[in-house]
Image (tube, grey):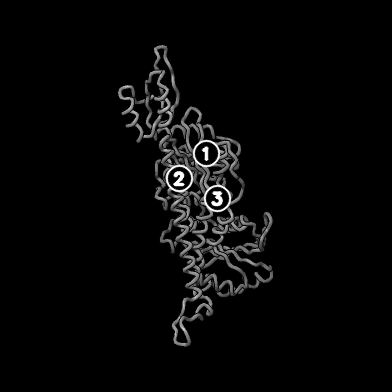
Amino acid sequence: MTTSPSAGPATARCLVLGPYLRVSETRAASGRADVALRSPEARLEEAAGLARAIDLDVVETGIVMLSAIRPATYLGKGKVEEIAGLVKSLEVALVVMDCALSPVQQRNLEKAWAAKVLDRTGLILEIFGRRAATREGTLQVELAHLSYQRSRLVRSWTHLERQRGGFGFLGGPGETQLETDRRIILDRIRRIEHDLEGVKRTRALHRTSRKRVPYPIVALVGYTNAGKSTLFNRLTRSGVLATDMLFATLDPTLRAVDLPNGPRVILSDTVGFISDLPTMLVAAFRATLEEVIEADLILHVRDVSHGDTQAQSRDVDQVLGELGIAPEDERILEVWNKIDRVSPEERERLDNLAARQAAERRPMLVSAVSGQGLDTLVAVIAERVARTRVALTVELDASDGAALSWLHRHGDVLDTATTDAGLTTVHLRVHPSKEGQVRAKFGEHVQTGI
């Protein structure tokens, strides 16, 4: 066990435990001998970081290596008793278990330790609940919370069965408190899902209106705390919250950015991913994450200074896979961030590693803090999004302001040039779906290319 300092105004003293299966058992459970695993120390450090993200006072952390998971308490009987003594001596009110507990396991551990027990799913849901700032984000988090609580409704207490219906002793069992709670939760879930359908329709309308222009969408994705928001601020010169904290930002942010010598794009900063991200959160935030699904270019931001960067990358790929985006999707461009934190030797190794990859899959090495590599990244973004648009040259009468205005509304006008003969040449890029409209309107005055 190790003692850790707390950060920020603590709300409760807590003990963070990492109950992890040994490597051989984990590989056996996965059915793969080559499965890559994080070190228990790194996993525990992340769990403690999650606890501190909601201002819990982490007084001690500890790793518990398991050979098997016990159905009743997850841990063995001897370890449960040992931790009960630790909980009492440390006077902690909360024990965070970095694993997924069943309702029965959670209830049994709470009885044994006389303390609140929170598993990884519950902890992440608590963080999301703290971070949600918009009505949409609040609805999404509440939906995930209710789905989680619904799974926690077990027949734990006998008083839930004491209610009876009818009169006298002949009446059958009435609606139990358990059934009442389940019905209330289900009704609330239905109302939230209805409200989120409205959010989904609104977002779809926004995407449709953007397609009328249309501007390419560049979405930032990555593991939480990989530096997405810092990179977003650098590229957009905006002030989105960016700090060294897990899930510092939750609600998505979109900004228009004019790329030097390139088109205007919409840059989207999304919620960070994490290992074992609760499936109900992926489902709840699907309306938000559809910005990623619809994106023309996806920047996968990685913290290459982190010891578990490869494992984090696989976790992001897994969540993208749940959204229907395969790791080999040609829209994905890896951005290896925080190169200012690595040693010169490690930087040279990363440069060589990137150079050995095919040009289309070659990662970009940057530092969102110092600005290293950002000019090259912006140039590559401009080149990649340009491929998603058709380049056209249109000749107009210089006096036809309405036609020029129409081109600005339906495409990305790069430049115009007017000759002494009274003709204006317009160079622009349009979405493939708009090419037919341009050709239908201007006929023989349209040429492919710029």
Name the disc covering residue 291, or none. Answer: 2
Q: Residues within 10 Å of mark 1 (few under 14, many from 20)?
A: some
Q: Position of residue 255 (x, y in %)?
A: 52, 39
Q: Secondary structure at mark 3?
A: loop
Question: Mark 1: which amino acid?
Answer: Arg
Residue 24 seen: no
- Seen from the viewer's position, the closer of residues 208 and 32 is 208
* Whether label 2 touches label 3, CB < 8 Å: no
Name the disc covering residue 134, or none. Answer: 3
Q: Residues within 10 Å of mark 2 (few under 14, many from 20)?
A: many
The quadrant holding residue 15 is bottom right
Q: Residues within 10 Å of mark 3 (few under 14, many from 20)?
A: few
Which mark lies nearer to you, 3 or 1? 3
Q: Image height check: is 42 above or below 292? A: below
The quadrant holding residue 115 is bottom right
Q: Position of residue 194 (x, y in %)?
A: 44, 56
- Distance in Å between CA atoms under marks 2 and 1: 13 Å
Q: If the image is split into quadrants, where does the C terminus sit?
A: top left
Question: Mark 2: which amino acid?
Answer: Glu
Q: Position of residue 127 (x, y in %)?
A: 57, 56
**Farthest residue, direction front:** 167
Q: Image height check: is 119 above or below 226? A: below
* Pointer 2 or 3: first along the chain: 3
* Pointer 3 or 1: first along the chain: 3
Question: Mark 3: which amino acid?
Answer: Thr
**Farthest residue, direction bottom:** 169
- Return the residue at label 1: 255
Name the disc covering residue 317, or none. Answer: none
| For residue 85, side relative to residue 144 (left or right) | right
- Seen from the viewer's position, the closer of residues 61 and 448 is 448
- Distance in Å between CA atoms under marks 3 and 1: 17 Å
Q: Image height check: is 147 above or below 108? A: above
